[in-house]
Image (cartoon, helix red, strand yellow):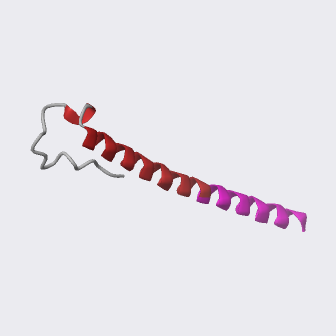
Amino acid sequence: MGTVSVCKDCQERKPACWGSCQRCIEAKEAMLERQQAVKKKLYDGARMNAVQYNGLRKARKRR
């Protein structure tokens, strides 16, 4: 979905700094929050579609 790009032109970059660099950690957290929000929105939409589909299916069966 997304990538962390704060390290691309970082002057303080060192090998394997993604575990200790505070800027990188904050960027990862923000990216994960955005991903979770998108997933929640998608899952909620899928659930609503399933409820509507099943409701229509039941209504058609009653006839």
**Above or below, 57 relative to 35:** below
The location of residue 38, given as percent across then percent down, is: 48, 55
Q: Nearer the viewer, residue 10 or 31?
A: 10
Q: Is residue 56 magenta?
A: yes
**Magenta part of the chain:** 45-63
**Above or below, 58 relative to 18:** below
Q: Is residue 47 left or right of residue 18?
A: right
Residue at the left extreme, as displayed: 11
Q: Nearer the viewer, residue 62 or 20?
A: 20
Residue drawn at (68%, 57%), measured in percent from left and top?
50
Residue drawn at (72%, 58%), measured in percent from left and top?
51
Q: Is residue 23 left or right of residue 12?
A: right
The location of residue 56, given as percent across then percent down, is: 77, 65
Image quarter where the C terminus lies is bottom right
The location of residue 46, given as percent across then percent down, is: 60, 57
Q: Is residue 31 magenta?
A: no
The location of residue 12, given as percent across then percent down, is: 12, 40
Q: Is residue 14 left or right of residue 58?
A: left
Residue drawn at (23%, 50%), measured in percent from left and top?
5
Q: Report the predominant secondary structure element of the magenta stretch.
A: helix
How many callouts does the rendering have?
0
Q: Is residue 17 left or right of residue 12?
A: right
Residue drawn at (75%, 59%), measured in percent from left and top?
54
